[in-house]
Amino acid sequence: MQLRSLKQADLKGKRVLLLVDYDVPASDDTRIRLTIPTIEYLRQQDAKIIILTKRGRPDGHIVENLRTDLVSQKLQKLLNRPVTKINTTIGREAESAVADLNEKQILMLENSRFLAGEGKNDPKTAAAMSRLADLVVNDQFSIAHRAEASRSAIAKFLPVYAGLNLLLEVKMLGKLIANPQRPFVAIIGGAKISDKLPAIQNLSKIADIVLVGGGVANNFLKAAGVDIAKSYQDENYIRLAKDLMNHHQIQHPFDVIAATSPKSSQTCTLNVVDPQKSTCPDDNLMFLDIGPDTIKLYTTVIAKAKTIFWNGPMGVFEQPDFATGTKTIAQAVAANKSAVTIVGGGDTIAAINKFKLAKQYDYVSAAGGAALDFLGGKKLPGLLPMMIK
Ligand code: ADP
Ligand code: MG
């Protein structure tokens, strides 16, 4: 896939509507930092910069704590330059604020989702947005799986170019799909199989093996005939999981750490191939982490890989009793310096930050659902307007 890059655009003196994802919690500004290279490039090229972001899901209503004031202040601090913030997204006030902009200056609009038309990909809303700019630069990979007026319908009115952060994300994730170095090992964990199944389906065709963990793995264990008791699972996916395992190299855990609840400190090990190694009473248990023998197998496979993609914790890592699987896998991926290592997912990033390993990977993707859809082989509506082939 090739995208029209902002480097191909003539930017001098142009009004650029820059789309970003500043939907960040108060404690974290990663997503703001990721857009700094694009903003600096636009400034070097003497563009007038008009920033548009969504925050939360206000769906056409004004919600005071979802205004963009806080993120505009954070941006101002990170750039160490003034950022003017206005309280409207489109219309006369916004248009006159844009008319006052000089080259290199930065204006932040109000939350795009305060407009009812944004989430509906409404052409009239897009037309009103297009009156603010000469062209659009989209640096918003993390929400590219959803069509909205600012990045989809707007293409009817203005040319759309890809920002540097978005280009990097597509390039790194693209490495996994096109000609990955082999062996390619995909590791998929996390809570819900419904979120991860399309990616597992597609990755199981591309990767040499998919190692599953976390709540996702419970469904594969059940499909393999294991009694998973009270464990987190989704009935609707058991048959699909079974089908996938029959046709592809998918490895599920064969021992797990279990307890009656994630809050319990009474843990035991359950081994489905070697019951002698099990320490669990036959109780109503939940499987909450991968076990020691599974960790051994997974780390051996990881050590031999030349390409690794990891999304989703191996267990309830927020509780120290169930964090060992996630931590050991995080360390094993970090330790393989001869592989291209790509890690993604909101909670997975929280985990690698907690273990202070985030700098040890080749690429950490800030996009959750969009990255999984991309790896799942879906056409992302947010990328279509920039696609040249
Ligand atoms: P990401 O945000 O990285 O994509 P997910 O949102 O899919 O990851 O999943 C993260 C959550 O999954 C964590 O909060 C973790 O506690 C939970 N989880 C992991 N393993 C299990 C399990 N065996 N049972 C229930 N929840 C789990
Ligand atoms: Mg998550």
Image (cartoon, rainbow, N blue to C red):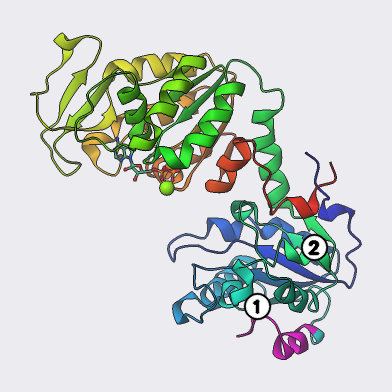
What kind of residue is marked 2? Ala
Q: Position of residue 81 (x, y in %)?
A: 67, 73
Secondary element at image label 1: loop
Q: Which residues are magenta?
A: 84-98
Count residues near mark 2 (Cα–Cα under 10 Å), then give few for <14, some for 14-19, many for 20+.
many
Q: Position of residue 273 (x, y in %)?
A: 25, 10
**Figure quadrant of residue 100:** bottom right
Report the quarter where the N terminus lies: top right
What residue is shown with label 1? Answer: 109
Q: Position of residue 62 (x, y in %)?
A: 51, 82
Q: Nearer the viewer, residue 78 or 183?
A: 183
What kind of residue is marked 1? Leu
Q: Nearer the viewer, residue 143 or 50?
A: 143
Q: Nearer the viewer, mark 2 or mark 1?
A: 2
Question: Which residue: 78% across, 78% down?
Answer: 132
As drawn, the label of residue 155 is: 2
Secondary element at image label 2: helix
Seen in the image, is 306 located left or right of residue 56?
right
**Ligand 1: quadrant of the figure:** top left
Q: Is residue 102 magenta?
A: no
Q: How many marks?
A: 2
Q: Is residue 149 visible?
A: yes
Count residues near mark 1 (Cα–Cα under 10 Å), then give few for <14, some for 14-19, many for 20+.
many
Q: Earlier in the sequence, mark 2 or mark 1?
A: 1
**Figure quadrant of residue 289:** top left
Question: Which residue: 61% across, 36% down?
Answer: 375
Q: Nearer the viewer, residue 155 or 311?
A: 155
Q: Is residue 360 visible?
A: no
